[in-house]
Image: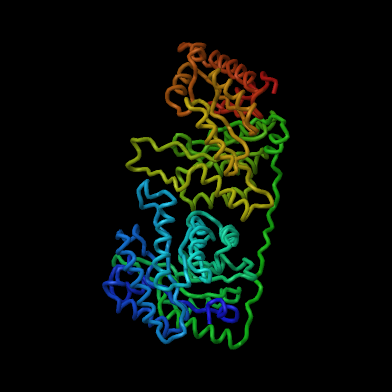
C-alpha cells in the first residue's frame, strides 16, 4: 500500500527526533548526526529500529543537514552520506510495513559567500541531493524546518520530473506567535504552498512545543488537505553546556491528540522527542481510533476589532492638503509641554501630530506610548515613528499590537539613525529588520489581525542626496511593501524643489513636503553640518547673524519657512512641519502666514 492510499483512511504515525535523541544516547554533539551514517551506522540503525518498535510507520533518513554547506564536505562525500543514510533506513525497515522518507533540511544560505548566494547555486545543491535520493530508490520526500517557500516550486517540480509518483511533504518551523522565522504567517504559508501543484502535503515541525503549535493551527481549515504536525517536545534548557529537553511523553501525547482532532493526518515529533513519546502517541491514537472519534471541524476565531476613525489619511487621499507637525518626545517623563503643544495644533487645524522614535539614537520617551497618550487625551490623529534600531522582531510585533489596541492607525516606518561610534561598546543596535522588511511585516499583520481597520504605513523620503534617483528607487520598493505616503526630509535647496516638481509630475504617490524652521544662526549651522539628511544653502544661513536676539532670529526663521512652503506646496500633497525646540506657536504663525 502506498503512502497516499494509507492516508485516505489512517493517521500516519511518524518518528521523533534524530539529532537530539542521538545526542541523548551517545553523549555527543547533535549538531551533525548525519556524519554518523558512515562513522556509527549501527547507532543510527538502532535509533530507527527503536522508533519502529515504538509504533512509527514513517521514518525519516538521517540526512536533515546533508548538504555541502552545512557539513562542509565535497559533493562526493555528500552523496556517500545520503546513500548510506538511506541504506541504513532500508536495513531498519526490512520486513516491516514502514515508509521511508528522504529527509531534507533547508540549505543554509546565510553561511555562504556572495557567489554561492546566487539562487541557482542553491537550486543546484537541492537537485544534487534529490538525484542522490532518487538513485537509491526514494519515493517519499520530506523538506522540513523551512522558513519560507523559496525554491519549493522548482525543487518539487524537479522531484516530480524524476518520479511523477513521488510523495512530497513540506514542513515549516514556526514561532510561538504563529509566524515562521522569516516573519511569514501560517495562513500565508499555506496559501503559497497550495499554489504549488507538485506538493502533496504540508505541515509544521520544530520551533514550538505541542501546545503552541495547537494554538497556532486550531483555527485553520484543513479540509481536503493532507497536513502534518511534528512539534518539539517543548522548550529546552542548558545543562552543563548541553541542550536538554524535558521528558514529557504523557503530556506531549495528550496535546498531540488535540492536534489530531483538527484533522491532521501525519503526526510525529521533532527536537527533544524520543521513542517513548512515539510509544505514548501510538497508545493514544489506538484509543482515538477505537472510539471512532472523528476530528471535529476547527473552531473559527472571529476577531471583533473596534474601528477607529482615521482623519489623516482620508484627507490626504482626497487631496485636502493635510498638515502634519512633528513634536519631539521629551528626554524624561515630563509630557506637559508636548500635550499642550498637541492641543494648540489641534485647535489650529493640524491633521496629525507625528512623534519621532529616539532620533539620533538618543533615548527619549517611547514614541508609540506618547502618541497613544496624545490621541487618547487630546483627540488629534497621530503618526508615531517606528524604527528598527532598538527592537528585535518580537519587540516590534509587541509594539504594533499595543499601538493598535490604543487606536493608533498611522505609522512612519524608518530604519533608524545609527548608534554614535563612542557608545557602540556599551549600546548595541538590533536591526532584525530594515524599513522595507518592517513595512512588509506590518502588511502581514494587517492581513492577519487588522484587516477590518489596517495600519496606514508611511515612509521617509530624503531628496537632499546626490543620487536622488537611487532614493526614488528606495521609495518605490517601500511602496511595493505597503507604504501609502511619504514625509520628506526638510527641504531648503532650490534644486531639490525642482526635482520634487518633476517627481510629482511623473509619480502617483502621496508626498508631504518637509519644512524645518530655523531659529538662529547657530541652529542653522548645526542643522546643516551635524544632522543627517539636512543641507541648508548658504543664502539661508547668511540671513541670520550671530548677534541676533531670539525674537529677530525667530522672525527670520518664520519668513524663510513661509517662503519654502509657498515654493513647494504646488508639488506636494500635504505639509510636514518639524517643530523646533517645541516652539509650537512659531509653527502656528508659519501656517497662518502661509495661508494654509
Closer-to-camera residue (206/128): 128
Which color scheme did the rendering employ for the protein? rainbow
In percent of the image, x 38 and y 44: which residue is there?
428
Closer-to-camera residue (552/325): 325
x%, y% of residue 520?
50, 17
Closer-to-camera residue (398/170): 170
The quarter of the image holding the C terminus is top right
Residue 239 in view, yes or no: no
In percent of the image, x 66 and y 64: which residue is there?
301
x%, y% of residue 356?
53, 36
For residue 536, above or below residue 180: above
Q: Tell me the quarter of the picture where residue 232 sits.
A: bottom left
Residue farthest left in this picture: 39
Residue 557 in view, yes or no: yes
x%, y% of residue 237?
37, 67
In percent of the image, x 50 and y 25: which residue is there?
464
Left or right of residue 105, residue 345 in this image: right
Left or right of residue 270, residue 45 in this image: left
Amino acid at each position: 500500500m502506498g503512502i497516499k492510499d494509507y492516508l485516505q483512511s489512517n493517521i500516519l504515525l511518524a518518528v521523533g527526533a534524530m539529532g537530539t535523541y542521538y545526542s541523548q544516547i551517545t553523549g555527543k554533539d547533535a549538531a551533525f548526526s548525519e556524519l554518523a551514517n558512515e562513522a556509527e551506522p549501527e547507532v543510527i540503525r538502532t535509533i530507527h529500529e527503536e522508533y519502529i518498535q515504538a509504533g512509527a510507520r514513517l521514518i525519516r533518513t538521517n540526512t536533515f543537514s546533508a548538504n555541502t554547506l552545512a557539513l562542509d564536505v565535497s559533493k562526493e562525500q555528500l552523496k556517500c552520506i545520503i546513500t548510506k543514510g538511506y541504506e541504513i533506513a532500508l536495513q531498519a525497515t526490512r520486513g516491516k510495513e514502514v515508509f521511508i522518507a528522504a529527509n531534507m533540511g533547508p540549505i543554509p544560505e546565510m553561511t555562504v559567500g556572495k557567489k554561492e548566494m546566487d539562487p541557482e547555486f542553491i537550486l543546484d545543491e537541492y537537485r544534487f541531493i534529490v538525484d542522490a535520493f532518487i538513485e537509491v530508490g526514494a519515493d517519499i520526500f520530506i523538506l522540513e524546518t523551512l522558513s519560507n517557500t523559496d525554491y519549493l516550486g522548482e525543487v518539487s517540480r524537479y522531484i516530480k520530473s524524476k518520479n511523477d509518483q513521488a510523495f512530497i511533504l513540506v514542513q515549516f518551523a514556526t514561532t510561538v506567535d504563529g509566524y515562521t522565522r522569516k516573519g511569514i504567517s501560517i495562513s500565508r504559508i499555506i496559501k503559497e504552498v497550495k499554489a504549488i501543484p507538485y506538493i502533496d502535503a504540508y505541515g509544521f515541525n520544530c520551533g514550538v512545543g505541542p501546545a503552541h503549535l495547537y494554538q497556532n493551527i486550531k483555527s485553520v481549515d484543513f479540509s481536503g488537505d493532507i497536513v502534518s504536525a511534528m512539534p518539539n517536545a517543548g522548550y529546552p534548557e542548558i545543562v552543563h553546556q548541553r541542550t536538554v529537553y524535558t521528558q514529557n511523553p504523557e503530556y506531549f501525547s495528550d496535546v498531540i491528540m488535540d492536534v489530531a482532532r483538527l484533522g491532521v493526518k501525519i503526526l510525529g515529533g521533532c527536537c527533544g522527542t524520543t521513542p517513548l513519546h512515539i510509544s505514548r502517541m501510538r497508545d493514544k491514537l489506538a484509543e482515538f481510533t477505537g472510539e471512532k472519534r472523528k476530528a471535529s471541524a476547527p473552531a473559527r476565531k472571529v476577531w471583533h476589532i473596534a474601528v477607529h476613525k482615521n482623519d489623516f489619511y482620508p484627507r490626504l487621499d482626497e487631496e485636502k492638503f493635510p498638515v502634519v507637525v512633528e513634536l519631539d518626545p521629551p528626554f524624561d517623563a515630563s509630557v506637559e509641554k508636548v500635550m499642550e503643544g498637541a492641543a494648540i495644533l489641534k485647535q489650529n487645524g493640524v491633521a496629525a501630530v507625528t512623534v519621532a522614535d529616539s532620533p539620533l539614537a538618543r533615548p527619549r520617551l517611547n514614541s508609540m506610548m506618547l502618541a497613544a497618550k496624545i490621541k487618547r487625551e487630546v483627540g488629534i490623529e497621530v503618526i508615531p515613528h517606528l524604527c528598527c534600531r532598538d527592537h528585535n522582531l518580537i519587540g516590534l510585533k509587541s509594539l504594533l499590537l499595543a499601538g493598535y489596541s490604543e487606536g493608533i492607525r498611522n505609522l512612519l516606518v524608518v530604519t533608524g539613525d545609527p548608534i554614535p561610534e563612542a557608545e557602540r561598546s556599551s549600546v548595541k543596535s538590533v536591526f532584525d529588520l530594515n524599513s522595507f522588511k518592517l513595512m512588509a511585516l506590518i502588511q502581514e499583520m494587517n492581513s492577519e489581525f487588522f484587516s477590518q481597520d489596517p495600519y496606514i504605513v508611511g515612509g521617509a523620503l530624503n531628496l537632499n542626496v546626490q543620487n536622488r534617483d537611487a532614493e526614488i528607487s528606495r521609495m518605490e520598493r517601500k511602496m511595493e511593501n505597503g507604504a501609502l505616503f511619504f514625509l520628506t526630509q526638510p527641504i531648503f535647496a532650490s534644486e531639490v524643489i525642482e526635482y520634487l516638481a518633476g517627481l510629482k509630475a511623473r509619480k502617483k504617490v502621496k508626498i508631504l513636503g518637509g519644512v524645518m524652521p530655523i531659529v538662529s544662526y547657530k541652529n542653522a549651522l548645526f542643522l546643516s553640518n551635524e544632522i543627517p539628511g539636512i543641507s541648508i544653502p548658504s543664502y539661508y544661513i547668511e540671513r541670520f547673524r550671530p548677534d541676533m536676539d531670539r525674537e529677530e532670529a525667530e522672525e527670520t526663521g518664520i519668513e524663510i519657512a513661509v517662503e519654502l512652503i509657498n515654493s513647494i506646496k504646488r508639488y506636494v500633497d500635504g505639509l510636514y512641519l518639524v517643530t523646533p525646540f517645541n516652539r509650537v506657536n512659531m509653527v502656528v504663525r508659519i501656517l497662518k502666514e502661509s495661508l494654509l
